[in-house]
Image (cartoon, rainbow, N blue to C red):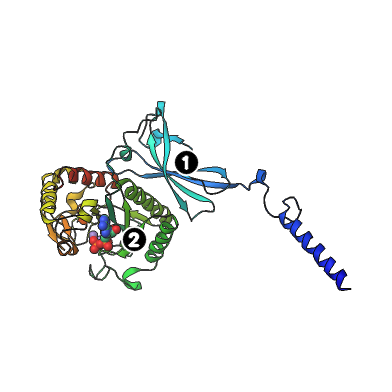
Amino acid sequence: MHEIQEILRNIRHIYCYVVSHCHTHPDSTEPKDNQKSMAKYKLEYIWLDGYQPVPNIRAKTLVKDFDKEPTLEQLPNWGFDGSSTQQAEGHSSDCVLKPVAKFHDASRKNGVIVLCEVLLADLKPHPTNARATILDDPETWFGFEQEYFLYKDGLPLGFPKEGFPKEGQGKYYCGVGYSHMGSIAREIVEKHLDLCLDAGINHEGINAEVAKGQWEFQIFGKGSKRAADEMCVARFILNRLCESYGVDVNYHCKPLGATDWNGSGMHANFSTKFLREVGGKEYFEALMAAFDKYKVEHIAVYGPDNHLRLTGHHETQSIHKFSFGIADRGASIRVPNSMPKNAWKGYLEDRRPNSQGDPYQIASRILETIATVPLPK
Ligand code: ADP
Ligand code: MN
Ligand code: MN
Ligand code: MN
């Protein structure tokens, strides 16, 4: 009797072994090599258009089969009608989209955001394509603080139809509670944060800002291209997310004009390898002298209408002056407290770039000025 049971057990073992190693068994769920399961991926190609002085982000979807989320190398060039984006004349309207970075798009099933440079038909960079020509150095790190207003029906979120909120500024910065923050804004900024993190963007934080309806998020990247790419994609994700709330993102640097309401900046924090690892007071002072010397060139790429914002009030320095100061939020460049404490090593905060600024040109200008200062021997 035992012998028969033993034989039956052995037969069962052999059967299980054969089944688990046989791809052709009808119960097998493993795909055959020649039958990889393909899925339809929604590739959102995004690019900056030709509007001046502030380009808009444009986007269109390409649906394509892949067996898993495609790599950048697998994404083809695509095209668009440049005559509808101020990038071409109607009689010769084809512009080329060249993928330069890809991000997971958690808002869509099988979604990918494909950041593109715009090329001319002969594959040379389009004149509106700043990214193709900027300076880059992966050893220089940038942290951008993007401030913006959420707008509904032409007014900052939470503003009354006429006039201004009675209480004025004071309680909104890092504020909490319905009467200060309303009910929609936080849902938007939280969703934005999650979408950015899911996309692999180096999103570093959020805070409510000084004016009602005003918020900020921070992006950090190593190299001007990486940091600016992530800023563009983070802006795109925010703009698209706000559509479903009937809300617009207003990036203007002084949307409430010459009132007692703050404007919006995009402070550019930066550190070179030398500043992080060697530093020194002498080098720091030489660097600040160069920033002073090129102040006009910096302001030229720090975003439009900046004279409305850089007034010397509301935590800004006048657009006509250059200054730096330790922990000074009224200076052009704020030197974090940690820097003098740490033998003048660390990072600096250029507070002048504004919320509509082009992060590629801002970072590139900072690199250009740094390059004029020789490193101590
Ligand atoms: P604040 O509002 O006080 O000016 P935030 O916390 O909003 O400061 O922003 C600080 C920024 O500085 C962040 O974007 C961060 O990534 C950036 N940052 C921190 N350390 C460095 C560094 N070593 N190099 C470049 N950027 C940095
Ligand atoms: Mn900040
Ligand atoms: Mn801020
Ligand atoms: Mn700042």
The x and y percentages for residue 239 are: 39, 53
Nearest-to-viewer mark from 1 and 2? 1
Q: Residue at x 18, y 46 (%)?
A: 370
Residue 2 is left or right of residue 255, and the answer is right
Residue 247 is left or right of residue 106, and the answer is left
Mark number displayed over residue 85: none
Task: Evaluate whether residue 353 shows in this view.
Answer: no
- Label 2: element kind: strand
* Camera-nearest residue between 323 and 308: 323
Residue on which the image places disc 1: 73
* Camera-nearest residue between 214 and 338: 338
Q: Quadrant of residue 134?
A: top left
Residue 150 to residue 366: above or below: below
Task: Indicate if the residue with disc 1 has its beta carbon within 8 Å of ligand 1.
Answer: no
Mark number displayed over residue 204: 2
Q: Amino acid at mark 1?
A: Glu
Q: Quadrant of residue 372?
A: top left
Quadrant where the N terminus sits is bottom right
The x and y percentages for residue 245 are: 43, 59
Judged from this view, the residue extending furthest toward the top is 91
Gap in angstroms between the C-alphas marked 1 and 2? 28 Å
The x and y percentages for residue 143 are: 28, 55
Task: Evaluate whether residue 196 shows in this view.
Answer: yes
1 or 2: tag closer to the N-terminus = 1
Residue neighbourhood size for the residue with mark 1, other residues' Cα within 10 Å, grouped as few (<14), some (14–19), many (≥20): few
Q: Amino acid at mark 2?
A: Glu
Q: Residue at x 41, y 26 (%)?
A: 92
Task: Indicate if the residue with disc 2 has its beta carbon within 8 Å of ligand 1.
Answer: yes
